[in-house]
Amino acid sequence: MSSNKRHILLSFAHRAEAKSFLNELPFRPLPGLTDCYSLEKDSERLSLVITGEGRENAMLQLSSTLAILKERSANDEFEVHNFGVCGYLQSFPSKFERGQVLSVKTIYAQKNHEEMEFKSFSSQKIGEADLISTSDRILSTDAADYLSNFAPLVDREAWAMAYTCHKQNIPFTCTKVISDFADGEICARVKEESEQWSEALLRHFLTLEASESIDSHSFKDQLKDLHITISQERSLNNLFKALEIKGFSLTEVLNQCDYKDLLSLEVRPKEKTKELIKRMGDLLNPLEKQLRERLNEVTSPLQRAGFKVRYDQGHENDVIHLTTSLEQSCNINQLISGLEEFEYLKFKEILRGKDV
Amino acid sequence: MFSRIFVEKSVANFPQVAVIKERFSKVPVTEIDAIEDIFGRVKKPYLQKRENLQLFLGKKKGTLVKEAPEAYGLAGEPHYYFIHAYNCIYECEYCYLQGYFQSPDIVLFLNHDDIAKEIETTIARHENKTVWFHAGEFSDSLALTHLSGELPFYFDLFKRYPKAKLELRTKSANIKDLIKMDPLKNIITSFSLSPEKRIKATDLKTPSLKHRLIAMKKLQELGHPIAIHLDPIIHEDQFLETYEELFSELKTYLDLNQIAYVSMGVVRFTSKVFHQVKKNYPKSELLAAEFHSSFDGKVRYPRPFRLWLLGKIKDLGLKAGLRDEQIYLCME
């Protein structure tokens, strides 16, 4: 288990909620882990964890499972998808029905009976309704009415799972089936009908799976002739995303950056990547390139004379910083003539926006 | 428009509440003790305004009139803004309200009497000076006036203080209530404008340029003073051509000579807002722009570009017939 794969961890609070998943999909228990299962597919890995009820259990079990899975599959790209039942607060204005399967948008938490946690977490995908993870089971109408000011759905665990994922920078999504009306008479009935809810969740999951396609053609595949360091990969990724917003396809970017010519340069592979980053930067920031060229032109006497030239970040001041080293007395005259030749007023005009 | 209305008990009997409830008769109404019991109590994502926008009606507590930041308006005169609403129905990708209140829900404060008292105290503090008041620092000044209904109140107030000035800042074309008022020289409606292409790309859900120009023309014809904010200026290919076109349309619809002032400002963000833009609009053109972290921590174009953009637009304005003294640079 060492190659880089998408790794989806399905999290459930109760075994009954996960029953159909465990029965219908070829999950096997993961050695050394309690209540944790996995199955391997060609393109991705699936794991399943049962956390137990309540926010503390959910947070502890999910974080320890993630830690162990990450140790075992360090290169995997993890995602957590929580499935489970939830209650519906009937005093909320929008109407929902029992048995309805919903993607959750934003998850809030109840701090105690009369207070809400400020922190909220949003699902990575488009959701249909918000949910509150409550501190206790809801046993009174007053409590239900107060909570319905914030969201229509309630559970006990999703917020803790979302928080755990947020802390570990792992994408989190949440799907719930409405099993009851959060009216205090839930437990027995939910247990009785648990098979039905678990089946509904599995059906939803399989639909999701079928509709998702994985784009395996990353730009990195197309740049296999280059040596790309991790930080360069990040820069290339950001530049490409920004150029994509500007309407460039990868092929167009490579053409505009004269990629073929770049490959023929007689420099080290890492330097070629550096040059590609520079060219992509110029393509993205034409004004900056123009400004750099104009400043180079006006400061060329200084550079020829042996000065290193530096400016304030963002050119916020009309300042030019010059550094140099003196080795021989004849250098002094060279520096003086460089300074004399330098047109400071022209430099200032450029920084003041004249004909940038 | 609204999925739910929360009404603070303190304003439950205000006539405007009845008007709003009648207008949204199908929207559920919940009475609450205080806005802050619900609003901002949890972090509600900004884009929930698209499907789950709630309206809160109540009283504003604390400071109601605040000193405006430097370079907020015409230089040399004291500027203040007053707070009678939070949040906006529009969705401009660069808007600083993203994440400002931790909730995109609209709050309308109905205790205009209290705001008026503070305005009067502020005017008294600046005896013999022209004091500016801006409505709409945290909202659009006109977009919801047909609901909030405060315009007659502020027209009455500023009629009594002709030396003080009120600016209503807007991106809307909602002049329904405004045209019912008798124009006052000291109440200026200022419209934020951008080229049409830019409005479509980044000023989501705002009225088109044409609708705004028609509204401005109507106001000008009725004798209401109007002003223009060319803010935020965003660079793009064909930037000069699009602004040339904008000025030409302005000339077609308006008497530029009668425009009270034209402010110009280049797009800028606090780093917090820029982070929100990335989160809320990951495909926004703004994220491919040539921004840098600037001297004050704000994210903006490097200074030479900003000055170049402002210089070029000012030139276009002068060419279109504006006078130098009508133009001022905002937040620069």
Image (spheres, rainbow, N blue to C red):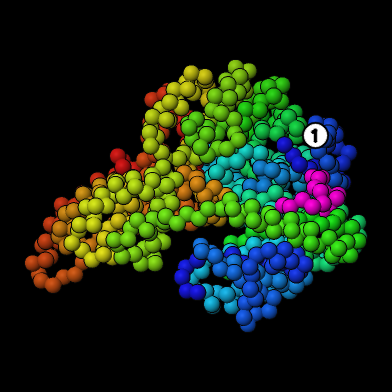
Q: Secondary structure at mark 1?
A: loop
Q: Which residues are magenta?
A: A86-102
To which residue does mark 1 refer?
B24
Residue B167 in the image, given as x and y percentages of width and height: 62, 34
Name the residue rendered at 62%, 25% in the picture: B185
Q: Amino acid at mark 1?
A: Phe
| Mark 1 Cα shell of 10 Å, populated few (<14), some (14-19), many (≥20) | some
Up the image or down, B168 lies above or below A9; here it is: above
- In the picture, measured across the screen, residue B16 lies left or right of residue A45, that is right
Residue A44 or residue B82, whichever sits in front: A44
- In the picture, measured across the screen, residue B138 lies left or right of residue B195, that is right
The residue most toward the bottom is A32
Up the image or down, B253 lies above or below A170; here it is: above
Query: Is residue B275 rendered magenta in the image?
Result: no
Name the residue rendered at 80%, 67% in the picture: A135
Q: Main secondary structure of the magenta part?
A: loop
Residue B100 or residue A34, whichever sits in front: A34
Name the residue rendered at 77%, 70% in the picture: A53
Residue A141 in the image, given as x and y percentages of width and height: 91, 56
Write down the quadrant of residue A350 in the picture: top left
Query: Is residue A93 rendered magenta in the image?
Result: yes
